[in-house]
Image: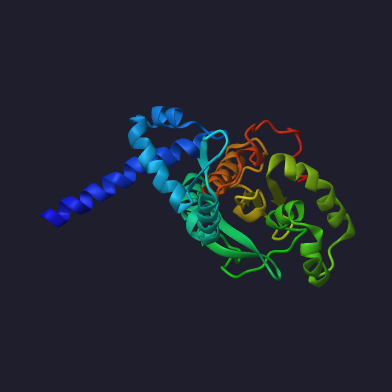
Amino acid sequence: MTAKIRTQRRIQSIDVGFRLIRVLEGASGKLPLSKIAELADMPASKAHLYMASFVQAGLVEQDPVTMRYGLGRYALQLGAAAMRQLDVAQVSREALDMLQSETGLLVFLTVWGNRGPVIIAKVDATVEVLVSVRVGHVLPLYQAATGRVYLAYKARSAIQHVETRERPVDATLKQRAEESLALIRQRQLAFSDSQINAGFASISAPIFDYAGEIAAAVTALGMKNDIDIDPQGRTAQRVHAAAVEVSRKLGCPPDVLREDFADPISNDRKSA
C-alpha cells in the first residue's frame, strides 16, 4: 500500500509541474515567476521550487538580467526528437480511415521515395475499384494528382532524377501540369481527371511537417461518377481536412496551412 501511495504522489507531482511547462509553451516570450504561478494557478513559492528543478534539468532557462523564465535548450531537443520519431503512416491512419468512411472512395498515403511518390498505406473503397492501387506502387509526376502535389512543393533539385527516369509525357500535358503548380499551392489541392486511367478521377492534398515542408500526400481515388472533383466540393474539402489534421499532428506551423476554403478560380476544375 505504501509503495502505491508513493507512486501516485510522484505522478501527481509531474502533472503539477507540467502545468508550468504548458504555461511557458503558450507564452509569446519569457515570463516573470509571479505571472507563471498565476497562470498555472499555484502559489509562487511552490512554482519556484518546480522552476528551479526544471532549470537544472535544462527544460527551462532563466534570463540572468530580467530573471524571467522561458523554455530551455533541452525542451527544444525533446521537441526535435519527438518530431523525428513520428511515423507519418501511423499518425495518418485515423484520418485515412475517416476520409474513406466519409467518401466511400479508395484513399491512400504517399511519401517521396527515390523513384518518386510511393504508396505506403491505403484504405480500400466501399465499392471495388477496378484499377491497380497497391502499397509500394510509384505514381508518375505529371499525370497523377499526387505527383503534381510533389511537383508543387518539392525542390526541383530533389526531383530531377525522377523526371529524367520517367517515361516521356505529352508536351501539352506536361506544360499544363507545370502551369497548374501555382494554383495547386494556392488551393493545397491537386486534381486528376482520366489522365492515368480513363474513367477515374482523384484529389490529392499535401501533408506538411513541423518545418512546413511536404512530408506526404493523401489522395482519394474513384470512378468519375463517384467522385466530385469540384475544388469547392465536399470531397475536396474532406481531402483537405484530412491533410490538415495529419499536418497538425506532425507539428506543422499554423500559418503554413490553408484556412480559407474559398477557391481562387471557382470554375476551374481541370487546370490543376
Q: Which of 15 and 65 lies nearest the eye of the viewer?
A: 65
Residue 97: percent from left, percent from top: 46, 52
Tell me: residue 196, above or below residue 47: below
Query: Residue 50 lies in what quarter of the image?
Result: top left
Left or right side of 205 for 248:
left
Residue most toward the left?
A: 1
Tell me: residue 39, above or below residue 5: above
User: In this rendering, does residue 148 appear at all?
Assistant: yes
Residue 248: percent from left, percent from top: 54, 45
Q: Residue at x 36, y 41 (%)?
A: 49
User: In this rendering, does residue 123 appear at all?
Assistant: no
Q: Which of 45 and 253 lies nearest the eye of the viewer?
A: 45
Tell me: residue 2, above or below residue 236: below
Q: Residue at x 75, y 58 (%)?
A: 143
Quarter of the image with the N terminus is bottom left
Left or right side of 41 for 217:
right
Residue most toward the front?
A: 65
